Amino acid sequence: MNNTDYNDQGAFDAGNNRFVAPVAGTYLFGATLLYKINSSTNARMRGRLVLNGTTEIRGSRGEISGAHASEATALWLQTMAPLAQGDTVELQGTFRAAYGYFAADHTSFWGCKVG
Protein backbone atom coordinates (compact mmCIF):
# COMPACT_ATOMS: atom_id res chain seq x y z
CA MET A 1 0.00 0.00 0.00
CA ASN A 2 1.91 3.03 -1.15
CA ASN A 3 -0.66 5.14 -3.01
CA THR A 4 -3.46 7.24 -1.58
CA ASP A 5 -6.78 8.22 -3.08
CA TYR A 6 -7.83 10.38 -0.13
CA ASN A 7 -5.46 11.61 2.55
CA ASP A 8 -6.63 15.11 3.42
CA GLN A 9 -5.53 14.74 7.06
CA GLY A 10 -2.18 13.18 6.16
CA ALA A 11 -2.84 10.10 8.30
CA PHE A 12 -1.54 7.59 5.74
CA ASP A 13 2.25 7.32 5.61
CA ALA A 14 2.83 6.05 2.06
CA GLY A 15 6.60 5.77 2.60
CA ASN A 16 6.07 3.18 5.34
CA ASN A 17 2.73 1.77 4.09
CA ARG A 18 0.78 2.45 7.28
CA PHE A 19 -1.88 4.59 8.91
CA VAL A 20 -0.64 6.87 11.71
CA ALA A 21 -3.23 8.11 14.21
CA PRO A 22 -3.09 11.92 14.23
CA VAL A 23 -4.95 12.07 17.58
CA ALA A 24 -6.12 9.60 20.22
CA GLY A 25 -9.56 8.10 19.65
CA THR A 26 -11.57 5.20 18.27
CA TYR A 27 -10.93 4.39 14.61
CA LEU A 28 -12.76 2.29 12.05
CA PHE A 29 -10.56 0.38 9.61
CA GLY A 30 -11.23 -1.69 6.56
CA ALA A 31 -9.36 -3.41 3.77
CA THR A 32 -9.99 -5.33 0.58
CA LEU A 33 -7.50 -7.85 -0.81
CA LEU A 34 -8.14 -9.05 -4.37
CA TYR A 35 -6.59 -12.36 -5.47
CA LYS A 36 -4.53 -12.53 -8.66
CA ILE A 37 -3.24 -15.94 -9.79
CA ASN A 38 0.43 -16.77 -9.87
CA SER A 39 0.51 -20.51 -10.59
CA SER A 40 -2.44 -22.06 -8.76
CA THR A 41 -5.99 -21.17 -7.71
CA ASN A 42 -5.38 -23.29 -4.58
CA ALA A 43 -3.46 -20.54 -2.78
CA ARG A 44 -5.04 -19.75 0.58
CA MET A 45 -5.37 -15.98 0.92
CA ARG A 46 -5.35 -14.37 4.36
CA GLY A 47 -5.14 -10.87 5.75
CA ARG A 48 -5.06 -8.96 9.02
CA LEU A 49 -4.54 -5.49 10.45
CA VAL A 50 -1.58 -4.98 12.80
CA LEU A 51 -1.12 -2.35 15.51
CA ASN A 52 2.34 -0.78 15.89
CA GLY A 53 3.97 -3.46 13.74
CA THR A 54 3.46 -6.37 16.14
CA THR A 55 -0.04 -6.83 17.57
CA GLU A 56 -2.89 -8.23 15.50
CA ILE A 57 -5.97 -6.05 15.97
CA ARG A 58 -8.82 -8.14 17.36
CA GLY A 59 -11.49 -8.93 14.78
CA SER A 60 -9.32 -8.08 11.78
CA ARG A 61 -8.10 -11.52 10.65
CA GLY A 62 -9.70 -13.21 7.67
CA GLU A 63 -8.97 -16.04 5.26
CA ILE A 64 -10.44 -17.53 2.12
CA SER A 65 -9.62 -21.22 2.19
CA GLY A 66 -11.37 -22.38 -1.00
CA ALA A 67 -10.14 -22.22 -4.58
CA HIS A 68 -10.05 -18.73 -6.09
CA ALA A 69 -11.10 -17.11 -9.35
CA SER A 70 -8.31 -14.80 -10.47
CA GLU A 71 -9.18 -11.11 -10.12
CA ALA A 72 -12.66 -12.00 -8.76
CA THR A 73 -12.04 -13.52 -5.31
CA ALA A 74 -11.78 -10.84 -2.64
CA LEU A 75 -11.28 -10.80 1.12
CA TRP A 76 -12.88 -7.95 3.10
CA LEU A 77 -11.70 -6.98 6.57
CA GLN A 78 -13.27 -4.46 8.93
CA THR A 79 -12.82 -3.64 12.62
CA MET A 80 -12.61 -0.82 15.14
CA ALA A 81 -9.71 -0.06 17.46
CA PRO A 82 -8.85 2.49 20.16
CA LEU A 83 -5.60 4.24 19.25
CA ALA A 84 -3.26 6.64 20.99
CA GLN A 85 -1.79 9.53 19.05
CA GLY A 86 1.08 8.18 16.92
CA ASP A 87 -0.11 4.54 16.94
CA THR A 88 0.26 2.86 13.57
CA VAL A 89 -1.95 0.37 11.74
CA GLU A 90 -0.86 -1.64 8.71
CA LEU A 91 -2.45 -4.21 6.44
CA GLN A 92 -0.68 -7.57 6.10
CA GLY A 93 -1.63 -10.13 3.49
CA THR A 94 -0.14 -13.59 2.97
CA PHE A 95 -0.72 -16.84 1.10
CA ARG A 96 -0.32 -20.44 2.16
CA ALA A 97 -0.49 -23.74 0.24
CA ALA A 98 0.54 -22.02 -3.03
CA TYR A 99 1.80 -18.66 -4.25
CA GLY A 100 -0.44 -15.83 -5.35
CA TYR A 101 -0.56 -12.09 -5.78
CA PHE A 102 -2.75 -9.30 -4.50
CA ALA A 103 -4.02 -7.21 -7.42
CA ALA A 104 -2.41 -3.84 -6.67
CA ASP A 105 -5.00 -1.73 -8.46
CA HIS A 106 -7.90 -3.32 -6.52
CA THR A 107 -6.40 -3.85 -3.07
CA SER A 108 -7.28 -1.13 -0.59
CA PHE A 109 -6.86 -0.12 3.04
CA TRP A 110 -8.69 2.69 4.79
CA GLY A 111 -9.24 4.20 8.22
CA CYS A 112 -11.19 7.03 9.82
CA LYS A 113 -11.75 8.42 13.31
CA VAL A 114 -15.24 7.72 14.66
CA GLY A 115 -14.95 8.69 18.30
Image (cartoon, rainbow, N blue to C red):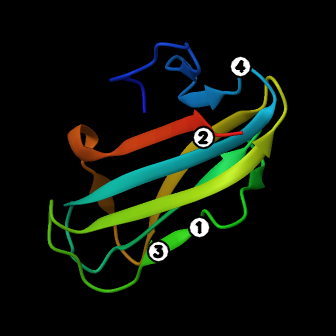
- Helix, strand or loop at label 2? It is strand
- Horizontal placement of 21 versus 32: left or right? right
What residue did someone put label 2 on? Answer: 90
Badge 1: few (under 14), some or many (20 or more) residues near its Cα, within 10 Å? some
Q: CA distance from mark 1 to mark 3?
A: 7 Å
- Asked if the residues shown at circle 4 and circle 1 are in contact, with their CB atoms under 8 angstroms apart, the answer is no
The mark that comes first in sequence, 4 or 3, is 4
Give the number of the disc on residue 61: 1
Q: CA distance from mark 3 to mark 2?
A: 17 Å
The mark that comes first in sequence, 2 or 1, is 1
What residue did someone put label 3 on? Answer: 63
Q: Position of residue 24 (x, y in %)?
A: 81, 29
Q: CA distance from mark 2 to mark 1?
A: 12 Å
Give the number of the disc on residue 22: 4
Who is closer to the viewer here, 38 or 30?
30
- Asked if the residues shown at circle 1 and circle 3 are in contact, with their CB atoms under 8 angstroms apart, the answer is yes
7 shown above or below 80: above
Q: Quadrant of residue 69?
A: bottom left
Q: CA distance from mark 2 to mark 4?
A: 15 Å
**Residue at the image position 55 percent from the left and 13 percent from the top:** 10
Q: Position of residue 73 (x, y in %)?
A: 23, 69
Q: CA distance from mark 4 to mark 1?
A: 24 Å
- Horizontal placement of 29 versus 80: left or right? left
- Helix, strand or loop at label 4? It is loop
- Asked if the residues shown at circle 3 and circle 2 are in contact, with their CB atoms under 8 angstroms apart, the answer is no
The mark that comes first in sequence, 2 or 4, is 4
**Residue at the image position 64 percent from the left and 40 percent from the top:** 114
- Horizontal placement of 1 versus 99: left or right? right
Instruction: Indicate the quadrant containing the C terminus: top left, top right, bottom left or bottom right.
Output: top right
- Horizontal placement of 85 versus 35: left or right? right
